[in-house]
Structure formats: C-alpha cells, structure tokens
Amino acid sequence: MPDEVTPERVAVFAASARIPLDEASAARVARAVSPTKARFAAEGIALPLEVEPASFLAAARKEIAP
C-alpha cells in the first residue's frame, strides 16, 4: 500500500460509486483515512477480500428469506 491517499483519489472512488462529493469533503475523507492506511502499511497488514463480494449479499438475503 505505498500509494498516498489524496483528495483526488477519494473523489475518483466516490465518483465511480456515484456518490457526489465536493472538494472539501474529499480532502476531509483523505485526511481521515491517511493515518489508518499508514499504520496498515507500516505493519504490513493486509485485509483479504471475499472472492466474490456479491456472495455476501446473497447470503444476507438467504437469512432474511422466508
């Protein structure tokens, strides 16, 4: 995780998720996320993601279904 969290990157991720985010908010998010990301990078911590993120939604719906 060597890349820095910048307001520009936050804005791109927000736009790809179709979340409107102004420049000030993107900067605030970047400042909030940067310390945690730096700690993960320093410790070499990796969070594995699910193979198929949609499977979580399917499992959640199965629990709710009658």
Image (cartoon, rainbow, N blue to C red):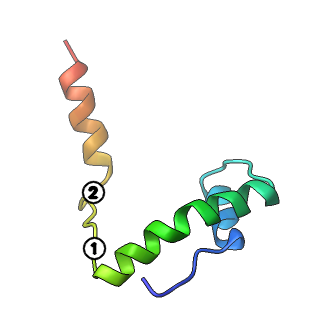
Q: Looking at the picture, does residue 43 appear above or below residue 50?
A: below
Say which residue label 2 marks: 52
Q: Residue at x 27, y 28 (%)?
A: 61
The percent position of residue 28, horizontal first and vertical second, equals 69, 58
> How many C-alpha atoms fall within 10 Å of the one at disc 1: few (<14), some, or many (≥20)?
few
Mark 2, other Cα within 10 Å: few <14 / some 14–19 / many ≥20: few
Label 1 near label 2: C-beta < 8 Å? no
Q: Quadrant of the N terminus?
A: bottom left
State the residue in front, 1 or 35. Answer: 35
Residue at figure coordinates x 26%, y 37% from the top left:
58
User: CA separation, marks 2 and 1?
Assistant: 17 Å
Residue identified by numbered label 1:
46
The amino acid sitting under disc 2 is Glu
Position of 53 relative to 47 (above/below): above
Q: Nearer the viewer, mark 2 or mark 1?
A: 1
Give the SS element for disc 2: loop
Q: Earlier in the sequence, mark 2 or mark 1?
A: 1
Lateral position of residue 50 relative to residue 42, left or right: left
Mark 1: amino acid:
Ala
Identify which residue is drawn at 63% across, 58% down: 29
Circle 1 sits in a helix, a strand or a loop, which is it? loop
Image position of 2 with respect to 60: above or below: below
Name the residue: 18% across, 24% down: 63
Residue 60 position, x and y percent, is 25, 32
Q: Position of residue 15 (x, y in %)?
A: 68, 58
Direction right: furthest residue = 23
